[in-house]
């Protein structure tokens, strides 16, 4: 009986220790790897400078060059005499096929957050601009490069907008397409700009600063994340 007990192998506690330590080590490694990946992802989400347009909104170098030359020359083309070529016009926004809300006669037709890329903007599909000779329509305004007064709604919240009644300068390729039956030639539409996706718009003057009530955003403006309700912005005039 004593011989049988002596012959039985001793219980090895080392196997138990290894059985506990190996899964624990694997768990620690997995948790550390997951944490490192999460920290790396968070860093990748941090702003790395100014956001630029992507995809179809990349700048056309040829058009950008024309915009620079047009602004330097400051030569304006009357709408009624414009030809099928890149031009610069100055006129007043008179109407649009829709709007983003606002006081009657001063509705917002384009809006974007301050510092956001162009593809974050929302706008009416067709906007009518008139000068002393006639009218034209702006297409793809939501893709345009727009220079407008900043409207602050707080220390960290600001946006830009275009309103009916704004006098603007527009640079783009003009497409002649006359239509209308009004006997007054100044009320006829002589063509469009922006059909090719290249459009530059700058506010020349804003006769009445939009009040806070004017900047209520229409339901269609919900494409903007957290659209601000801008406060009054001082009128800007560029001579």
Image: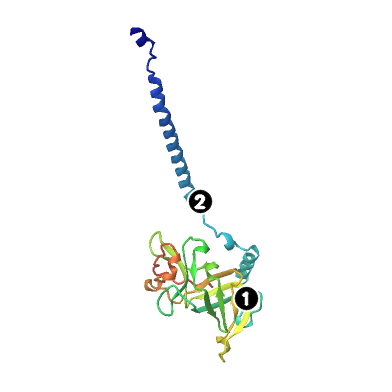
Q: Residue furthest front?
A: 1
Q: Which residue is mark 2?
A: 48
- Residue at the image point whose x is 44% and y is 70% from the top: 220
Q: Earlier in the sequence, mark 2 or mark 1?
A: 2
- Residue at the image point whose x is 62% and y is 78% from the top: 77
Q: Residues within 10 Å of mark 1 (few under 14, many from 20)?
A: many
For residue 162, side relative to residue 231 (left or right): right
Q: Residue furthest left?
A: 1
Whether tag 2 and tag 1 are in contact, CB under 8 A, the answer is no
Image quadrant for the N terminus?
Answer: top left
Q: Residue 53, located in which quarter of the rendered image?
A: bottom right
Q: Is residue 51 above or below residue 3?
A: below
Q: Residue 9, located in which quarter of the rendered image?
A: top left
Q: Is residue 163 above or below residue 133?
A: above
Q: Position of residue 131 (x, y in %)?
A: 55, 81
For residue 167, side relative to residue 59 (left or right): left
Q: Which of the pair 27/114 is nearer the observer?
A: 27
Q: Secondary structure at mark 1?
A: strand
**Chosen colour scheme:** rainbow
Q: Residue furthest bottom?
A: 183
Q: Which numbered circle lies on residue 174?
A: 1
Q: Position of residue 6 (x, y in %)?
A: 36, 9
Image quadrant for the C terminus?
Answer: bottom right
Distance of label 2 from label 1 (alpha carbons): 37 Å
Tally the numbered discs. Answer: 2
Q: Which of the pair 155/97 is nearer the observer?
A: 97
Q: Is residue 183 above or below residue 99?
A: below
Q: Position of residue 39 (x, y in %)?
A: 45, 43
- Residue at the image point whose x is 41% and y is 24% from the top: 18
């Amino acid at each position: 009986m004593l011989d049988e007990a002596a012959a039985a192998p001793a219980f090895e506690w080392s196997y138990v220790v290894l059985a506990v330590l190996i899964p624990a080590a694997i768990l620690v490694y997995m948790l550390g790897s997951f944490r490192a990946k999460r920290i790396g992802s968070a860093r990748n989400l941090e702003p790395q400078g100014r956001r630029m347009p992507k995809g179809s909104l990349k700048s056309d170098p040829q058009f950008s060059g024309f915009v620079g030359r047009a602004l330097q020359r400051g030569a304006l083309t009357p709408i009624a005499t414009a030809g099928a070529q890149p031009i610069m016009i100055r006129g007043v926004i008179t109407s649009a096929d829709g709007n983003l809300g606002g006081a009657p006669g001063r509705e917002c037709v384009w809006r974007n957050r301050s510092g956001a890329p162009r593809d974050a903007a929302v706008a009416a599909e067709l906007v009518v601009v008139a000068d002393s000779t006639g009218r034209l329509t702006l297409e793809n305004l939501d893709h345009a490069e727009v220079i407008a007064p900043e409207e602050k709604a707080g220390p960290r919240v600001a946006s830009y907008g275009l309103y009916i009644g704004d006098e603007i300068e527009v640079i783009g390729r003009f497409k002649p397409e006359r239509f209308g039956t009004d006997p007054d030639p100044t009320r006829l539409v002589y063509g469009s700009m922006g059909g090719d996706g290249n459009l530059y718009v700058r506010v020349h003057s804003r006769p009445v600063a939009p009040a806070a009530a004017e900047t209520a955003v229409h339901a269609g403006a919900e494409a903007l994340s957290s659209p601000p309700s801008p406060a009054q912005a001082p009128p800007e005039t560029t001579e």
